[in-house]
Image: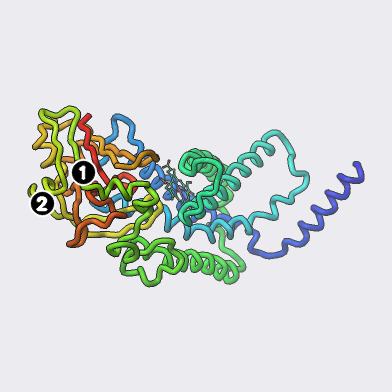
């Protein structure tokens, strides 16, 4: 044995001796692991809902009801994700002495297992750190957040499932056998659950207005912003403050229609107006409800003679950006609650909410409720 290796072995043995807490045991690791597994599967499922609502494959049509479905799934994703942070930290603390086992690699199978753990731990930390920075509006990463977060979710979930299958017999045995020292463990697990509960209670108000006053950790709260409704992108940031106020603004309806329409704001106000109580449900987890008033998209498309099975693209005055346009499926535009909104809570739309005209539809991510519309194209 080289002197360097001998020193490493001695250091590892000394460290092993220091992990004296009974909470570094299998039973604590098993309980935390099961809770973490359920939390991750929930995050994966709700994350996939968000992804496929924004990028549906050709065969997939999301229903427009229930109205609040996306609001709930994305709220669970982000608020549940934040509440899972203490659980992940507790699990890592419970099992980290194993990182110091000697020798670090015993066989090819053991090396594979350790690689799997690297993917699981590294991937989980990546998901949490990027997720938290994203909802904190700190877009400082040199890669696109959604793409990285999306693919890492598959790596983490795959590694988690393999890990769960491998550890299941041990975890089951540890949970089933009667513990000698339940009190310390129970206090530890309750503290972790309490920390998660405090995080959930102080952020849930960003989506659930009765808790709004408690939401001290939430980046956005209902009741803040122009007309009492939060905005992520203002007209100035989108570069449309001038064009949206232009007196020459017109909305055109074109594409696969019997006749093109060109309508001024006065023309739109002269059409039958409908009201809908709908939330803006942001991909970043916050949501807020308002009463919108405007022309039902289906009424406008009927005037233009659009076929009932056509998809529709709505286009913003924005010059660029990922969310300049969005697609509206027949399922959504045929819903009477889908409006080209001109007003919000009894007033004309504020420019930051999409004046002169924006889309608002049920069960749809906020980034797809396109603002500052100027064209509706029937595809
Ligand atoms: C603190 C924890 C987390 C936070 C704050 C968080 C936050 C977010 C946010 C804000 C989005 C929406 C991105 C967008 O469309 O702009 C998102 C999407 C997503 N998240 Fe998370 N997340 C967390 C943990 C996780 C975990 C643990 C997983 C999976 C194991 C996961 C899987 C996904 C997936 C698959 C998407 C869809 C990405 C896409 O649209 O392509 N997330 N998450």
User: Which numbered disc covers residue 248?
Assistant: 1
Q: Toward which corner of the image does residue 368 lie, by quadrant?
A: top left
Residue 61: give x, y in percent of width and height.
26, 36
Q: Secondary structure at mark 2?
A: loop
Label 1 crowd bin: few (<14), some (14–19), many (20+), radius 10 Å:
few
Q: CA distance from mark 1 to mark 2?
A: 22 Å
Q: Residue at x 28, y 37 (%)?
A: 327
Q: Quadrant of the C terminus?
A: top left
Q: How is the image coloured?
A: rainbow
Mark 2 highlights which residue?
Answer: 273
Q: Quick one: 208 or 10, which is closer to the camera?
A: 208
Task: Name the mark nearer the viewer: 1 or 2.
Answer: 1
Label 2 crowd bin: few (<14), some (14–19), many (20+), radius 10 Å:
some
Q: Secondary structure at mark 1?
A: loop
User: Which numbered disc covers residue 182?
Assistant: none
Image-based side of 205 in relation to 4, left or right = left
Compared with 108, 66 (above or below) is below
Q: Quick one: 127 or 3, which is closer to the camera?
A: 127
Residue 11: give x, y in percent of width and height.
83, 54
Image-based side of 346 in relation to 244, left or right = left
Would residue 93 be visible to someone looking at this image? yes
Q: Residue at x 42, y 58 (%)?
A: 79
């Amino acid at each position: 044995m080289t002197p360097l290796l001998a020193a490493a072995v001695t250091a590892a043995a000394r460290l092993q001796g220091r992990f004296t807490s009974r909470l570094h045991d299998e039973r604590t690791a098993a309980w935390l692991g099961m809770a973490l597994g359920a939390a991750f599967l929930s995050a994966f499922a709700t994350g996939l809902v968000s992804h496929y609502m924004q990028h549906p494959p050709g065969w997939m049509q999301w229903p427009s009801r229930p109205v609040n479905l996306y609001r709930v799934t994305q709220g669970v994703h982000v608020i549940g994700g934040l509440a899972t942070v203490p659980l992940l930290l507790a699990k890592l603390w419970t099992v980290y002495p194993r990182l110091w086992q000697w020798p670090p690699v015993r066989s090819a199978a053991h090396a594979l297992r350790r690689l799997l753990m690297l993917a699981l731990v590294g991937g989980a930390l990546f998901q949490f750190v990027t997720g938290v920075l994203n909802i904190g509006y700190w877009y400082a990463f040199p890669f696109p957040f959604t793409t990285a977060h999306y693919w890492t979710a598959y790596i983490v979930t795959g590694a988690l499932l393999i890990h769960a299958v491998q550890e299941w017999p041990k975890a089951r045995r540890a949970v089933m056998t009667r513990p000698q020292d339940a009190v310390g463990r129970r206090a530890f697990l309750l503290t972790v659950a309490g920390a998660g509960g405090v995080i959930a209670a102080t952020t849930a108000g960003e989506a659930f207005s009765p808790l709004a006053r408690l939401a001290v950790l939430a980046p956005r709260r209902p009741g803040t912003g122009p007309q009492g409704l939060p905005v992520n992108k203002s007209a100035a940031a989108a570069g449309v403050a001038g064009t949206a106020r232009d007196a020459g603004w017109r909305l055109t309806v074109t594409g696969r229609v019997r006749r093109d329409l060109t309508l001024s704001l006065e023309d739109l106000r002269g059409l039958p107006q409908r009201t809908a109580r709908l939330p803006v449900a942001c991909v970043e987890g916050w949501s807020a409800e308002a009463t919108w008033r405007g022309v039902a998209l289906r009424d406008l498309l009927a005037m233009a003679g659009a076929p009932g099975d056509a998809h529709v693209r709505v286009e913003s005055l924005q010059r660029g950006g990922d969310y300049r346009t969005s697609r509206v499926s027949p399922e959504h535009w045929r819903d009477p609650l889908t409006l080209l909104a001109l007003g919000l809570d009894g007033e004309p739309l504020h420019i930051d909410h999409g004046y002169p005209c924006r889309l608002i539809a049920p069960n749809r991510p906020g980034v797809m409720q396109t603002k500052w519309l100027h064209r509706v194209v029937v595809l």
